[in-house]
Image (spheres, helix red, strand yellow):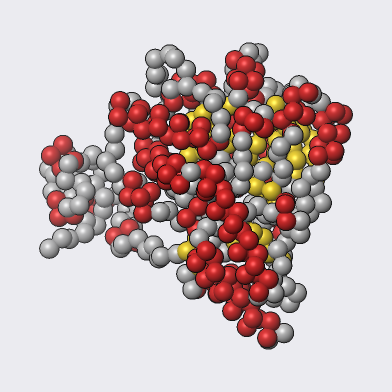
Amino acid sequence: MYRLPSRLPLHRPSFNNLFSFHRNATASPLRSSSPLVDSQQQTKNDSMPPVPENLLKPMEIPARELFGPGPSNMTLPIQDSASRSLLGHLHPEFIKIMSDAREGLQYVFKTQSAYTFAVSGTGHAGMEAAVLNLLERGEKILALKTGIWGQRCANLAKRLDLQVQTVEAVEGNAVPFDEVKKAIESFKPQVLFVCQGESSTGVCQPIDGLGELCHQNNCLLLVDTVASLGGTEFDMDAWGVDCVYSATQKVLNAPPGLAPISFSQRAMDKIKTRKTPVASWYFDALELGNYWGADEGPKRYHHTAPISTVYTLRTALAEIAKEGIDAVIARHRKNSEIVYGELEAINLKPFVEKKEWRLPCLTTISVPDGVDAAEVQKEMMAQGIEIAGGLGPTAGRIWRIGTFGANSNEEKIRHVIKKLGEIVQTKRSRL
Ligand SMILES: *Cc1c(COP(=O)(O)O)cnc(C)c1O
């Protein structure tokens, strides 16, 4: 029988044991049969933490319908691709997979730009990469605030010694074009930050027209599409977007860990003529671009890409390519009508009143008076369904239901909102 060692061995496992590490507990080097282990030293060293008992039990991962603001549920092909064998990060077969993923990203961002790839990290890494590359110390950024993400960007910009101004929308609304125009003309920023799909309020900020406005004012347009790419219309080149980033775990249904990003020619011209180098090695767009094959030069080692996550990104993009990006967007839009219809049927109201400002893939709902939002979420969770509450100023006042990618499915939507209706009804009848 397999006996647990009382202490982890202090030495590295011997070479012979190295390859029996996985799937064979009895041959584990933890068993410390190696002559290199000094058993006396083991008992003497009381300061060493004991073997963590919890790690010797299986992980608990319940089945869960993820209808919050992300992560969303993986599809089976995406989940399968996460368990494929690793390749080296510079092996030709892996480079081909990266190149396929880049083509897929150009397709979903709708851009010809070569500088289209994915930053290793979550959505926030996309934001950091964008702001670090597009701006030099002391320059100005104007951030539209329709919820927390404009504020987060302003916070980051201050840490980077940038001058920051924000234009705040009335809660539950987008920022009107004329207000953006006035602010750009008076502040004269080098970059305008816009969050297209504001996941804390459910507001979808219109982007069309902002590119032209920015370029007339010598400003670059930066758009966060973390919660919106694939879930609503986006057209990088036609809209004159200079930098856009997203994340894998929302509409794309892949695990978190990569932030798709693209830089326009205008953005790259600025980056290539910076007076100072980008204050980050990890996020340097020129280095990342070289590693992802955006330039003609020989590939240099920059960092090790998260190989398995790149597999899942490629699979996610392949699924979108099969359905067609416009069909995917149309499905989200059509299913958002089902969300609104089902909500009306249970007498709940969308938080964003103006329909054209609602994000089709994430709906915010006003919590009725006298109902405890968190209690309802807890009861949903007990039935295996995650929905989220508000975030920041909207905490306790709204629910957020993300219907991302494969979760934008009529049957699933009706099921989730029916459950919500039943739970809210029991709370209301107690009022
Ligand atoms: C989730 C989200 C982010 C942050 O992404 P992480 O992957 O959590 O770092 C940024 N912007 C928006 C709009 C989001 O919804």
Q: Residue at x 31, y 62 (%)?
A: 58
Rendered view: 13 above or below 173 = above
Residue 263's x, y, as percent?
Answer: 58, 26
| Front in this rendered view, residue 225 or 332 | 332
* 397 lies above or below 230: below
> What residue lies at 51% left-to-right and 43% top-to-bottom?
325
> Front-most of 429 and 389?
429
Residue appearing at x 40%, y 54% in the figure: 75
User: Camera-side residue: 259 or 9?
Assistant: 259
Q: Position of residue 218 (x, y in %)?
A: 76, 21
Circle count: 0
Q: Quadrant of residue 123?
A: top right
Query: Can residue 140 be seen?
Result: no
**Which quarter of the image is occupied by the C terminus?**
bottom right
Residue 250 lies, in percent from the top left, at: 53, 49
Q: Residue at x 35, y 46 (%)?
A: 82
Is residue 105 found left or right of 83 in the rendered image? right
120, above or below 326, in the image = above
Q: Of all residues shown, which one is farthest toward the bottom?
A: 430
Quarter occupied by the N terminus: bottom left
Residue 168, position in %: x, y?
80, 45
